[in-house]
Image: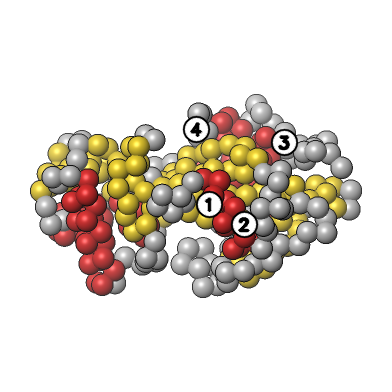
Amino acid sequence: MSAAPQFSYALSDNIHDKLWQWAQANYGLHGSWQTLWLNHLPLGRLNAQWQAQVQKDWPGEWEARSDGLHLRSDSWLSLSDALQHMAHGWKQLGILHGWRNERFDVYHGDKVLFPLERAAFRPLGLMSKAVHLNGFTFKDGEWQLWIGKRSEYKAVDPNKLDNLVGGGVSCGEDIRETVLRESEEEAGLSAHHMQNLILCNRLHSLRPVSRGLHNEILYIFDTILPVETIPENQDGEVSGFELMNIDRIVDAMLSDAMMSDAQLVILDAFDRYRLINPQHELSKWLKSIKINE
């Protein structure tokens, strides 16, 4: 078995074109968005609905300018508290769904500014971070990927197909700590199984969603699992796993059975392993959303 997945073929031109059409339809800033400025920094984006809601409910100083909506407070701590209080009010009103009692960090560059309930990130268009893991296994003479199916109880994309592991980076948590924790919880894989874990890429996922704007940095890991290693969910967030070859994965992609970011992560793997023609617009776009160190 090779030390890394290798493929001797590429996807057909027709599949290239269809996947490129999917990417164009699902990613990017479609529609009208206003920049959300927090203490003079452009940290989020608002659609018209959420801009009106913020202007109505923000307890402090705000100003709508030509360059966006400006919210201000005396400190990052007080601004964080005000945003958390506002978001909790939205939850009580029933207009903010998916409340997790879990906070993500709000960054400016590499600097952490403050924590905030993760459910508020999409309405405010704030940038979050997440880890995704491609799990490869060589079986029946070909490289295949472990694909999870999200639980029907998930707040986002229930019953959709997913990567082997995926999850948000919680407040104060290291990227590698997150992928190891999520691997244990979602797939029953210990650090022993993750000895060949490799951080392969970082992509900027930007797409409108029902709750606002999904604005996230995806940290993409690959690992190779022995054929005898079978993932098993531990936390109830995944209903099951299936080992799928490339043809079946592509069929799932084209039938809208897979959640968007999981599909993006696998397309990145396809690009890195030359299943996608590097001259095609799909490959060029994948490289354009890559975040360099």
**Which amino acid is tagged 2?**
Ser
Q: Is residue 12 visible?
A: no
* Amino acid on which the number 1 mark rests in the picture: Thr
Q: How many marks?
A: 4
Tell me where residue 98 appears, x and y as whole percent.
39, 66
Residue type highlighted by circle 4? Ile
The quarter of the image holding the N terminus is top right
Q: Which residue is mark 3?
A: 273
Count residues near mark 2 (Cα–Cα under 10 Å), then give few for <14, some for 14-19, many for 20+: many
The local secondary structure at tag 1 comes to: helix
Residue at 16% over, 56% down? 58
Between disc 3 and disc 1, the foreground one is: 1
Look at the image and name its color scheme.
Answer: secondary structure
Q: Which residue is mark 1?
A: 178
Residue that carries the numbered disc 4 in the rendered image = 291
Local SS, label 3: loop
